[in-house]
Image (cartoon, rainbow, N blue to C red):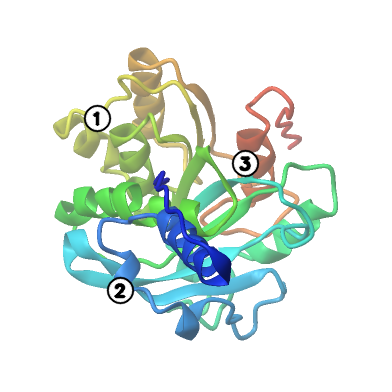
Amino acid sequence: MEVNTRIRLGGLGGLILLFAVATLARQPEWNGVRNKINHADTIGNRIKHAVSNQVQLVHSHFPVESLDTTTSIWIYLPSNYSSTRNRYPVIYFLGGEHAFSDSLSPDNKEWLMDEALDSLNQTKAPKAIVVAVHRFFSDTVQVDGASSFLMNNLKPYIDSVYRTQKESAVVAGSGQMAAWALYTTLRYPEVFKKAGIFSPPADIFPYLKNHQLQGKGHKGMLFFYEGNEMDDLQELTDNIGMHSSALIYSTHHQNPKRHESPMGGWFPEFYNWILGNGYNYIIRYKP
């Protein structure tokens, strides 16, 4: 939040005070979250067993005020983040306990996202920040509060601390967290314009219809993967396509080049497609 303040003081004391005022003026507000974050205890710590040096802890008890709880937030920064002044799109990966390390996952399963990102960083693929949000709710009635947290607390915080492209926010998840991701992009299509929906639950279509979230106003991009060919998924994507102008890609094929997971081995293709705006990268499937 920029504040224009004029103070006329002489000498070194005036310069110090002016610097202090300017610094305070640039500090953003995060709906009260700022004062509850202890940076000294959190930022910069690495995950045990994480392969990539680019993975860091943001906060182990980030406040989720809408649901009166906390969650862990981890972040992957591009390899050139510290050597440039570039700004980057952000992918918010929900169910982030699976993203970077099996030591954080409750079932010791990891989606190897840091390894994939390190490999992508060695290519001409677009570079992005990935924020891993650990699951912090279990009841579907809490989805709206969880989405409100992403919109009103976490995204403003990440945008204020890191060099992000504020207009380029992607939300993604697998399993139950895919339902959260889809709900969020349909609830806030003007902010979370792109999404990755991997192995969504079978009852997601009637749930969204009951909440009148059928894609109205969505002009972004949606990537769907479902390991089993579900009629509901086809109906879901057809319905969203009918009510929106979103660019939609969907597949039910496990990627034969990679190991099986709820993401179907599609993360690198999803990453290139979603950040390439669907045109600079074409997904090719060869059975």
Residue 199 as seen in the image, left or right of residue 254: left
x, y (%) of residue 114? Answer: 67, 65
Tag 3 secondary structure: helix
Q: How far apart are marks 2 and 3 (CA)?
A: 35 Å
Q: Mark 3 points at which residue?
A: 270
* Amino acid marked by disc 2: Lys
x, y (%) of residue 237? Answer: 40, 26
Foreground of the two, 45 or 28: 28
Foreground of the two, 26 or 185: 26
* Amino acid marked by disc 3: Phe
Foreground of the two, 255 or 243: 243
Q: How far apart are marks 2 and 1 (CA)?
A: 33 Å
Q: Name the residue under label 1.
A: 213
Residue at 41% from the left image edge and 55% from the top image edge: 25
Residue 281 seen in the current view: yes
Tag 1 secondary structure: loop
Q: Mark 1–mark 3 contact, CB under 8 Å?
A: no
Q: Which of marks 2 and 3 is nearer the N terminus?
A: 2
Residue 163 as seen in the image, left or right of residue 80: left
Tag 2 secondary structure: helix
Tell me if residue 182 comes above or below residue 16 in the rendering: above
> 10 Å neighbourhood of mark 1: few (<14), some, or many (≥20)?
some
Question: Which image quarter is the C terminus in?
Answer: top right
Tell me if residue 149 comes above or below residue 186 in the rendering: below
Quarter of image, res 193: top left
Foreground of the two, 239 or 131: 131
> 10 Å neighbourhood of mark 3: few (<14), some, or many (≥20)?
many
Q: Which mark is residue 36?
A: 2
